Image (spheres, rainbow, N blue to C red):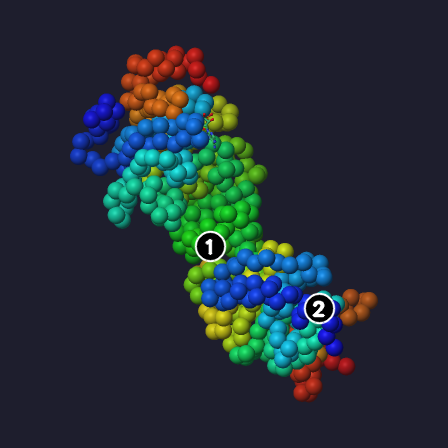
């Protein structure tokens, strides 16, 4: 039941129009960070206010929403955002990736390939990939406009010199259509290959930083690297203890007071569906 | 032909040589205040030009106008580009000018921290310009960084240390390595030895002199220190109140200054 005190999806129509304009601009210039006037949301920054505003602007009453946090539908953050939209938009919600039309995510891309007609909305804490080495906003903006991206490789160089390999494992920078360098939000680099040529629309919202960027369907996305240190989409060299999957991104979880550990799929929907289909891992009850 | 042009073309250079840099009637005001005004001179390949003058005389303003860091109000800065011959860098597009700034031009700041990335290792600092022009082989970048640390007398074992752990002299040498790694043709230096101990200054000057000679660099060096120009500069411009009051071969100007202000300067009354 929609709470009548709110406009559909909480934001007023004018604000949603403003956000949609930013989204359209972002889709027209893949990887470019579009400034937008971020609104106060009834949740603190760091809880995905950028993603929530983007979701609010794209949701229609017919949509089915899925919200994940680090791959899981049942964490506090995911649950509270899902119930926020149940309350303010009255939309149907689901945990099944293939049933959802809009998926808001923090830190993961679902394992099941997304399809045309779906929208993946990322919560982004720091949209500027150059920020790490160049704190001046005026300068990073110029670097983007002039395609001066040598600094991104300085960051990777520093990684290799310190660790012997590119140790960046989250928020791994990418180049979009040979033009803009983009921060894919703190997804594991395991997910980077899924960014490119994806059938679904990908939208990125940064609330505190007031930026929206986007990847339209079937966009070329390349992870930065060196010739002699090529990009690798790594994951733990294990299989899921519950469903036995060998090709999904795994979280290491502590299972008892004695420090016992197991690896499980971070994508809970993927894992549940596999178990329902009869797959079993070595730690399954 | 002005007196200065005459000095230029009859000094160290054959008449037929093309200047690497031609500055024409360059002026920059800050509001109603003069930064520098009506500056014209030619710099030939392999030449080192010194700019001296008291504090506030407009040396840094002139240098920054030439290097494209600040936009002059009027005038031209014509650089002999590799691809297209002489181009006015004041009116060229910003991307072109910035490209020059990380390829054929180098800028050495007085304070190393203005010219270095203090949060990045020495190797990363030297490698940045290589990566900026497209180097994508880690091993090659590292090899060149190692080589350059060695050339500026920094122990290559320090390659992964941050410049914050370096002495002032080492930081300045690292800044030089970082600038020269892409083989620029023209180096702008603003008081490169300022703020360093005298013994450290001497070593740095020796190093710069060797690099200028070995690489056939052209350079424009701003300094308070007449010893610096005596050692490094082929020619000299003396500035006062935003204007060049005297210009000529270094030895001539220092040994036989014509302008009253140059005489004062040389008699060391004004040496800082
Ligand atoms: N950003 C600025 N705004 C206003 N005035 C400025 C600015 N920068 C320099 N000036 C003025 O322009 C004049 C020339 O300054 P400039 O810094 O070029 O001198 P300088 O010869 O490099 O001096 P120093 O030896 O102290 O470095 C001075 O009078 C200075 O006060
Ligand atoms: Mg100065």
Q: Is residue B140 placed above or below B54 in the rendered structure?
A: below
Residue B90 can be seen in this image? yes
Q: Is residue A20 placed above or below A147 in the rendered structure?
A: below
Task: Name the spot of residue B66 as percent of width and height, x first.
Answer: 36, 36
Q: Which residue is mark 1?
A: A144
Q: Is residue A114 placed above or below B120 in the rendered structure?
A: below
**Left or right: residue A280 compared with residue A24:** right
Q: Is residue A268 placed above or below B219 in the rendered structure?
A: below
Task: Name the spot of residue B270 as percent of width and height, x first.
Answer: 43, 15
Disc 1 is placed on an element classified as helix
Q: Chain of mark 1?
A: A
Q: Which residue is mark 2?
A: A6
- Give the quarter of the image for residue A191: bottom right
Disc 2 is placed on an element classified as loop
Residue B202 can be seen in this image? no
Give the residue drawn at x 40%, y 54%.
B134
Q: Chain of mark 2?
A: A
Task: Name the spot of residue B60 as percent of width and height, x first.
Answer: 42, 30
Between residue A212 and residue A242, name the one nearer to us: A212
- Report whether the residue tagged 2 is closer than 8 Å to ligand 1: no
Residue A161 numbered mark, or none: none
Marks 2 and 1, Cα distance to the nearest angstrom?
Answer: 39 Å
Q: Hey, which residue is sitting farthest left in the picture? A: B16
Q: Quadrant of ligand 1?
A: top left
Task: Name the spot of residue A23 as percent of width and height, x first.
Answer: 54, 66
Location of the N terminus of chain B (image quadrant): top left
Give the residue drawn at x 56%, y 51%.
A132
Instruction: Say which label, 2 or 1, has the lower sequence index.
Output: 2
């Amino acid at each position: 039941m929609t709470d009548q005190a709110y406009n559909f999806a909480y934001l007023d129509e004018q604000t949603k129009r403003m956000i949609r304009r930013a989204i359209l601009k972002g889709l027209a210039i893949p990887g470019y960070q579009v400034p937008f006037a971020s609104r106060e949301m009834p949740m603190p920054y760091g809880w995905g206010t950028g993603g929530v505003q983007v979701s609010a602007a794209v949701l229609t009453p017919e949509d089915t929403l899925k919200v994940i946090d680090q791959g899981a539908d049942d964490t506090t953050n995911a649950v509270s955002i899902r119930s926020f939209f149940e309350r303010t938009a009255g939309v149907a919600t689901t945990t099944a990736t293939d049933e959802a039309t809009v998926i808001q995510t923090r830190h993961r891309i679902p394992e099941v390939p997304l399809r045309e007609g779906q929208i993946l909305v990322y919560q982004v804490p720091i949209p500027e990939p150059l920020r790490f080495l160049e704190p001046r906003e005026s300068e990073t903006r110029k670097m983007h406009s002039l395609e001066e991206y040598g600094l991104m490789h300085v960051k990777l160089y520093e990684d290799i010199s310190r660790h012997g390999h590119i140790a960046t494992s989250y928020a791994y920078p990418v180049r979009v259509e040979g033009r803009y360098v983009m921060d894919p939000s703190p997804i594991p680099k395991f997910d980077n290959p899924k960014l490119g040529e994806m059938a679904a629309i990908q939208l990125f919202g940064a609330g505190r930083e007031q930026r929206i960027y986007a990847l339209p369907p079937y966009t070329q996305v390349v992870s930065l690297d060196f010739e002699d240190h090529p990009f690798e989409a790594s994951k733990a060299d294990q299989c899921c203890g519950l469903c036995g999957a060998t090709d999904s991104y795994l979280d290491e979880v502590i299972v008892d007071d004695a420090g016992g550990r197991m690896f499980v799929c971070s994508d809970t929907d993927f894992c549940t569906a596999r178990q329902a289909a009869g797959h079993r891992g070595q730690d399954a009850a | 032909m002005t007196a200065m042009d005459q000095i230029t073309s009859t000094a160290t250079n054959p008449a037929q040589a093309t200047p690497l840099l031609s500055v024409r009637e360059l002026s920059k005001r800050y509001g109603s205040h003069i930064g520098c005004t009506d500056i014209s001179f030619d710099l030939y390949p392999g030449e080192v030009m010194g700019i001296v003058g008291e504090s506030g005389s407009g040396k840094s303003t002139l240098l920054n106008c030439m290097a494209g860091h600040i936009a002059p109000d009027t005038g031209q800065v014509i650089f002999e580009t590799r691809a297209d011959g002489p181009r006015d860098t004041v009116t060229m597009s910003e991307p072109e000018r910035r490209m020059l700034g990380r390829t054929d031009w180098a800028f050495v700041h007085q304070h190393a921290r203005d010219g270095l990335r203090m949060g990045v290792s020495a190797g990363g600092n030297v490698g940045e310009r290589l990566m900026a022009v497209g180097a994508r082989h880690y091993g090659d970048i590292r090899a060149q960084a190692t080589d350059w640390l060695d050339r500026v007398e920094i122990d290559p074992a320090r390659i992964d240390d941050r410049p914050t752990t370096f002495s002032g002299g080492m930081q300045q040498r690292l800044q030089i390595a970082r600038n020269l790694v892409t083989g620029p043709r023209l180096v702008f230096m603003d008081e490169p030895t300022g703020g360093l101990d005298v013994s450290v200054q001497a070593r740095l000057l020796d190093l710069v002199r060797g690099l200028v000679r070995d690489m056939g660099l052209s350079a424009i060096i701003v300094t308070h220190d007449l010893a610096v120009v005596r050692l490094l500069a082929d020619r000299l411009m003396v500035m006062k109140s935003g204007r060049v009051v005297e210009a000529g071969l270094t030895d001539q100007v220092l040994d036989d200054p014509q302008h009253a202000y140059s005489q004062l300067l040389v008699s060391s009354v004004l040496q800082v």
